[in-house]
Image: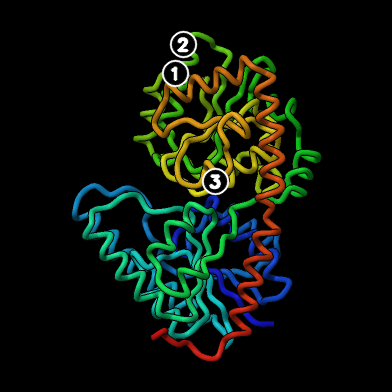
Amino acid sequence: MPQIIYAWNYVEWGGAQVHFLALMREAKKFFDVLVLLPEGTDAQFLGFLEREGIQHRLFQGHIDLGLKHTIAEKISRHWTRIRSEYAMLNAIKDAAECDAIVHTDISPGQSLASLVWLCLRFETFITLHNAQPAVLWWRMALWKLKYGVISRFSNFHVFCTNEHAAEYYRLLYRGAVSQDIKITYDSINPDEIDDALRTGQGRERLRSRFGISDNEFVVLTVGQFIDRKGRWTLLESALKLISSDSNWKFVWVSPTLPDEMDLKRIEECGLGNRFRLIRSTDIGGDRRSILSFFAIADVFALPSYVEGVPIALLEAMASGLACVSTNVYGIPEVIIDRDTGLLIEAGDSDGLAAALKELRNDSKLRESLATKGRDLARTKFDERIAARAAVESYKKAIADTTRPTTKT
């Protein structure tokens, strides 16, 4: 079978990796699948790969995704990224067969040289999850130049995981690359979710296990506990709500725990045991355990600043939870306000508190949003549809391959 290599150079995992897993499940029916990722990758995600029977290899060197404030810190991060990409490209070179396809998670804005190197050797795919924030004119001009350069390669292919991102990147890429952008939605597997909810511990046992009483109204968030996920907006809203009613419980599930500075800030918020931050490995080592955990909640909230279509949001909707999220990027493609969920503006802690309070007080609205959201998530965002679309693109690329060329 022809080979497909999935590769990235960061150790954290989240929705992007869950999306890649969906593509891999379908791709391994037709391709020899290999995943290349850096040493230090979260052991839980490596366990996911092993349970799927997907081969993986580790290379040395990874990028630092943390926020940098000083010029020295930013320069250091830049050189770390260059070294990690060099290590990743060497790993690809060593592992690749002559007819390999490479699907990676880097973009022309930062990694043009690496993408050119790949395109000179392989059919190359990238996935883009969200549009870029507004930038100064000179940076946008530089991006357009870089995206124009990579657009000249006939063996370079772009997937976007939502319509908002696709519309944005069609303006940056040129020619056939721009016209051929495929939407492979961030998505979920309804059968996998049903199985997890059916065979999991269930609401009562989960609440007992994590010390949550039956009369507490649980607001669940799932994702990295980072700024762009709106973590402080959520905690500000929680504080407003518990000030008048102590029967709220806010639970955030994250693959990693924050550093000491963030833990101190959480403590200073004064939420006490009204807020619980749980590492996903404490729930269980497999995807089924995490999916079954949605049963613990009454509603789901994700007040993000930057998102494509969050897989955790889709999983919550498909699990039958009424959801609140923000009117940014690809989220309105999933949350139709007051139809499949509630939309607020990013950073609006008062709006989030009001939306959560309304859902708690109005069981009919909560049920209606949950039902319509569940139907939308399970029909439009079934991962098997997205994965088949990606695999068809891989097959077409293989069939059309003669040698890497540039467009004139």
Question: Percent from the top left, x then y, of residue 359?
Answer: 60, 21
On screen, residue 290 above or below 170: above
**Residue 210, percent from left and from top:** 64, 27
Disc 2 marks a residue whose amino acid type is: Ser
Mark closer to the chain start, 2 or 3:
2
What amino acid type is highlighted by mark number 3?
Pro
At label 3, counting other C-alpha atoms closer than 10 Å, the crowd grade (few under 14, some 14-19, many 20 or more) is many
Determine contact: label 1, label 2, CB under 8 Å: yes
Label annotation for residue 310 = 3
Please tell me which residue is depicted at 59% across the width and 85% down the height of the picture.
Answer: 400
Q: Which residue is mark 2?
A: 243
Taking depth in this image into account, of 391 and 259 the one nearest to the observer is: 391
> Farthest residue toward the left?
71
Contact (CB < 8 A) between labels 3 and 1? no
Mark toward the viewer: 3 or 1: 3
| Kind of residue at badge 1 | Leu
**Where is 117 relative to 106, above or below?**
below
